[in-house]
Image (cartoon, rainbow, N blue to C red):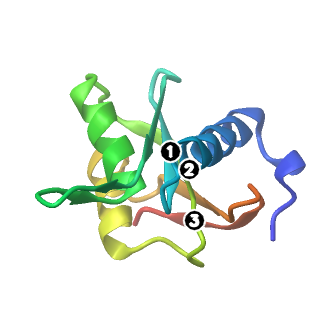
């Protein structure tokens, strides 16, 4: 586990935003991404009959739709131990293989950091 207070303040911010989205919307996951300009995009899981997206995929889609050209970092708050290959691919498509993805539990404690690669 990673001491969240030891995180860079900007990384701590996206973890907090992801956690808030999860709690506010009552969804399984919350996610946030930070683009190359420092803007953040926050999302929860989308589970419609016709559309299913993880929180991280939704956050990346929101960034793209808002004109982001790249990502600096991503965070997901989930009960899962890590993120799926599909989630990592979405982050990699916009941010590149070295983009860090912080994986935190529902309490906001970062369990691990993986790269999108």
Picture residue at 22% right of the left edge, 29% below the top: 65
Side of 68 where 40 appears, left or right: right
What secondary structure is marked by label 2? helix
The total number of labels drawn is 3
Choose the circle earlier in sequence order: 2 or 3.
2
Give the foreground label among 2 and 3: 2
- Mark 2 and mark 3: Cα distance apart in space: 8 Å
Q: Nearer the viewer, mark 2 or mark 1?
A: 1
Relative height, residue 68 to residue 31 (above, below): above
How dense is the environment of label 2, judged by Cα within 10 Å: few (below 14), some, or many (20 and up)?
A: many
In the rendered view of the protein, which quadrant contains the C terminus? bottom left
Q: Position of residue 105 (x, y in %)?
A: 69, 65
Q: Residues within 10 Å of mark 1 (few under 14, many from 20)?
A: few
**Residue for badge 2:** 22
Side of 14 where 107 appears, left or right: right
Q: Which residue is mark 1?
A: 25
Cα distance, mark 3 to mark 1?
13 Å
Residue 71 place in picture, x, y as percent: 42, 39
Mark 3 against mark 1, which lies toward the viewer? 1
Q: Residues within 10 Å of mark 3 (few under 14, many from 20)?
A: many
């Amino acid at each position: 586990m990673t001491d969240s207070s030891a995180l860079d303040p900007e990384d701590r911010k996206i973890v907090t935003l992801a956690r808030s989205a999860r709690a506010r919307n009552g969804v399984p996951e919350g996610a946030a991404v930070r683009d190359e300009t420092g803007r953040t995009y926050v999302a929860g899981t989308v589970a419609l009959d016709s559309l299913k997206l993880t929180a991280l995929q939704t956050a990346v889609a929101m960034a793209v739709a808002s004109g982001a050209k790249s990502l600096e970092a991503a965070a997901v708050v989930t009960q899962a131990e890590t993120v799926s290959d599909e989630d990592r691919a979405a982050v990699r498509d916009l941010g590149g293989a070295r983009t860090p993805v912080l994986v935190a539990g529902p309490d906001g404690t970062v369990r691990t950091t993986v790269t999108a690669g």
